[in-house]
Amino acid sequence: MRLRVSLAAFAAVAATPLAALAQDAPAPSPFDTAWHNQQTLALVERAANGWYALPGGALWRRVAGNGTGPAPTLADVIAVHYTGTLVDGTEFDSSAGGPPATFPLDGLIPAWQLAIPMMGVGDTIELAIPASMAYGPRGNRTIPGGATLLFRIELLAIDGVTP
């Protein structure tokens, strides 16, 4: 009896037009191949356009300033304005429109720990970060696992001191 029910169920599915099955297909997850390709493409495009590489695959470019201001070390607390987006343009975090964000540099994601010390106070950089240098395959509450992150960061002060 069980075999007959299973065969009957199979026959019903096999007889269903493919278009009907496709309409009921779930939306693509952020872990499908096309999504992962978009994450990689965001990095490849920037590398091809002259962005500088950091160890681990993060990319950066200076968009304001000249790097001559005081530069922080990992032991410093920094004040920044920043905006973080996913490669599709979705903003996941920002200090814009509010007070500067203040962080101990050694407590931030690895890409920030490498890029921020290359800045001088007053500089603004753009940073493209592979997941391996950010939140990895797990992500966090607002960032999907495996996501490439894009940041615009303005370094305002080091340990509360501006030049």
Image: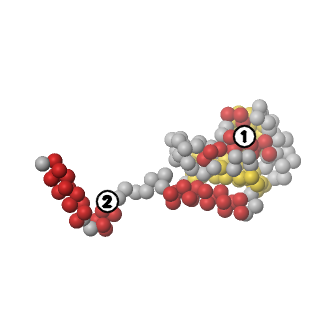
Q: Position of residue 138 (x, y in %)?
A: 53, 41
Q: Amino acid at mark 2?
A: Asp
Q: Is residue 139 above or below residue 77?
A: below
Q: Residue furthest left?
A: 1
Residue at the image point whose x is 31% and y is 68% from the top: 19
Q: Residue furthest top?
A: 75
Where does label 2 land, which residue? 24
Where does label 1 land, which residue? 113
Q: Is residue 6 above or below residue 111?
A: below
Residue at the image point whose x is 33% and y is 63% from the top: 22
**In the rendered structure, are the residues bearing label 2 and label 1 in contact, judged by CB atoms less than 8 Å apart?**
no
Q: Position of residue 86 (x, y in %)?
A: 58, 53
Whole-number angstrom distance, CA of label 2 to CA of label 1: 45 Å
Q: Amino acid at mark 1?
A: Gln
Label for residue 54?
Answer: none
Q: Is residue 97 visible to us here?
A: no
Dot 2 falls on a residue whose secondary structure is: loop
Q: How is the image coloured?
A: secondary structure
Dot 1 falls on a residue whose secondary structure is: helix
Q: Quadrant of residue 9?
A: bottom left
Total label count? Answer: 2
Q: Position of residue 8 (x, y in %)?
A: 17, 57
Q: Is residue 102 visible to us here?
A: yes
Q: Position of residue 46 (x, y in %)?
A: 69, 60
Circle 1 Cα neighbour tier, 10 Å, few/some/many (<14 / 14–19 / ≥20): some
Label located before the other in sequence (2 or 1): 2
148 on left or right of 70? left
